[in-house]
């Protein structure tokens, strides 16, 4: 949809209008005649840049969603929308559009308020007129556009004066100044559940957020001036308060000068972050100090792009998912014993794959290993590794020649093998037909000389989905296909020499055939008449280079 039909302007009793994710570029003036409209959803209209000048005539409008749009300026007189409760964005105009004082006249905001382009506020007194301290908003977003290091005293006072009501549940601040106001992290915000602080590039310290008893989600992103996270971050030293006692998710990201994380103290081991379930430390290139010693409730740890970090992982006995990349090998020495998913990559300093790193983990279901430099002799063939339910292992491993002794475990469901030429050469001996649980097989190589596929007895009869990619394949081996009575989805990728799909006796269970970058197959299909196409039984969809044909 690119524009609204004029007939919509005649539906006088319309209450709800959803135009989200359309390519509409402007809203017609007749939309403002819908005086009974209560909900207007314009989210993800990426081409929409303006709202109608007479939006104020929608006197019953309660919810206006303009998130993910190109709107940069609000129309004037929005303060006349007395019923408005939710406005995903309120954009402060630099010239003739809406000013922040209008917010003070919108008395029914209850759910969410986002105030953007706050650098356009001319006076701290104007920000007081927004009356945020009197509004019981549940969610508040305050955002300044990036204007470098030119932060005036006026801008600092604007943020001071935007202090919200103590009932606040969620707070997001995107602000490039050297300090945050005292109300951020004040203990009076006892109901706040979520805080996201972004791009305070000059701020050297973090506010005392540990005193907030209801805080569950905290992200601190782009605090480039922080060198140390000190004890003040935890709040006061009261023996009756556990710092971050309710926190479940903690994210530090893009802390480019952060070097050290002070613990709450050895004598208080286990008291801080006692409920933390997820910890993310991402893109902190100078961090080299210790991590929290004990995280008894953590189930997910993610540490990426921290090459100097030499600390051991926290003691977290219930961790189920661990992701590590571009770090020090110390992080790999002692893995949690109950891991179910392990993703590691870009440990370029390793001279060999850690032989015993998986010895203590007996619950592993997903293992991903990527970008281990071959120049360090990382030869997985020499290792004794048990792989269980790991569909993403063994992609781009040109040295792997065979699976571990005993073959793959019987409960494997998904197998994904690409660009592993030595391994593919021995595919007949994999014993896939003995695996009763395999449903999805994706297999291929740009170099393996496979002319006909599949060999008889290679594929398990349990397959429901098969994807192949062999550039030298010229023909199908029907004997290798006939027993696949459960196969529903067949994908053929990058097989430029393959010039036919078997039609006589083709698997009757197939419902979808997908053909990508196979020019001879495409030509063959397009040359068929509609009557001939229908000879393929039961196939509901045939997709050729993203173009769909209905069977």
Image: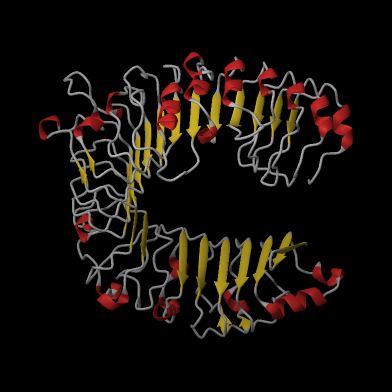
Say which of 143 and 320 sits in front.
Answer: 143
Residue 432, x across and y down, in percent: 45, 69
Report whether residue 398 is seen.
yes
Relative horizontal placement of residue 126, taking residue 248 as reference (left or right): right
277 vs 431: above or below = above
Residue 149, x across and y down, in percent: 40, 44
Residue visible at 67% across and 65% down in the picture: 513
Residue pushed farthest left? 267
Say which of 463 and 420 sits in front.
Answer: 420
Residue visible at 82% across and 32% down in the picture: 29
Residue visible at 53% across and 29% down in the picture: 122
Relative horizontal placement of residue 396, taking residue 360 as reference (left or right): right
Viewport quadrant of the C terminus: bottom right
Report whether residue 500 is seen.
no
Residue 425, x across and y down, in percent: 43, 82
Figure quadrant of residue 387: bottom left
């Amino acid at each position: 949809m690119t524009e609204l039909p004029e007939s919509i302007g005649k539906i006088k009793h319309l209450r709800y209008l959803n135009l989200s994710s359309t390519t509409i570029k402007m809203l017609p003036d007749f939309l403002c005649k819908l005086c009974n409209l209560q909900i207007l959803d314009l989210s993800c209209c990426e081409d929409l840049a303006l709202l109608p000048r007479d939006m104020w005539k929608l006197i019953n409008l309660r919810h206006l969603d303009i998130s993910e749009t190109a709107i940069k300026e609000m129309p004037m007189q929005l303060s006349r929308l007395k019923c408005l409760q939710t406005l995903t964005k309120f954009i402060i105009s630099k010239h003739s559009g809406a000013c922040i004082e209008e917010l003070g006249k919108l008395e029914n905001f209850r759910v969410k308020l986002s105030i953007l382009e706050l650098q356009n506020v001319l006076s701290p007194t104007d920000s007081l007129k927004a009356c945020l301290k009197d509004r019981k908003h549940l969610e508040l977003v305050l955002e300044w556009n990036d204007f470098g290091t030119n932060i005036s005293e006026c801008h600092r006072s604007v943020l001071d004066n935007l202090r919200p009501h103590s009932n606040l549940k969620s707070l997001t601040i995107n602000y490039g100044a050297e300090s945050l106001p005292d109300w951020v992290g004040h203990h009076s915000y006892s109901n706040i559940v979520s805080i996201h602080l972004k791009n305070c590039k000059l701020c050297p310290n973090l506010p005392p957020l540990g005193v907030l008893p209801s805080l569950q989600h905290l992200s601190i992103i782009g605090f480039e001036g922080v060198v140390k996270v000190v004890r003040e971050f935890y709040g006061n030293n009261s023996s009756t308060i556990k710092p971050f006692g309710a926190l479940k998710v903690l994210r530090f990201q893009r802390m480019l000068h952060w070097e050290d994380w002070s613990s709450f103290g050895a004598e208080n081991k286990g008291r801080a972050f006692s409920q933390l379930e997820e910890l993310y430390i991402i893109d902190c290139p100078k961090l080299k100090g210790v991590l929290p010693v004990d995280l008894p409730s953590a189930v997910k740890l993610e540490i990426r792009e921290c090459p100097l970090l030499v600390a051991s992982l926290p003691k977290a006995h219930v961790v189920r998912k661990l992701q590590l990349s571009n770090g020090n090998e110390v992080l790999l020495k002692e893995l949690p014993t109950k891991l179910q998913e392990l993703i590691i990559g870009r440990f370029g300093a390793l001279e060999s794959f850690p032989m015993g790193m998986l010895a203590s983990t007996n619950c592993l279901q997903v293992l991903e290993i990527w970008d281990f430099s071959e120049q360090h002799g990382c030869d997985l063939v020499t290792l004794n590794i048990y792989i269980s339910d790991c569909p993403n292992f063994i992609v781009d491993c040109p040295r792997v020649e065979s699976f571990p002794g005993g073959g793959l475990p019987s409960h494997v469901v998904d197998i994904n093998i690409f660009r592993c030429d030595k391994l593919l050469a021995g595919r007949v001996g994999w014993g896939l037909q003995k695996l009763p649980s395999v449903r999805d097989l994706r297999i291929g190589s740009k170099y393996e000389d496979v002319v006909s596929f599949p060999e008889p007895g290679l594929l398990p009869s349990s397959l429901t989905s098969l994807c192949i990619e062999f550039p030298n394949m010229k023909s199908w081996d029907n004997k290798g296909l006939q027993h696949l009575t459960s196969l529903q989805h067949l994908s053929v990728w990058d097989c430029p020499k393959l010039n036919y799909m078997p039609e006589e006796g083709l698997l009757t269970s197939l419902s979808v055939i997908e053909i990508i970058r196979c020019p001879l197959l495409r030509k063959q299909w397009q040359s068929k008449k509609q009557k001939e196409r229908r000879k393929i039984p039961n196939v509901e969809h045939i997709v050729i280079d993203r173009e769909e044909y209905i069977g």
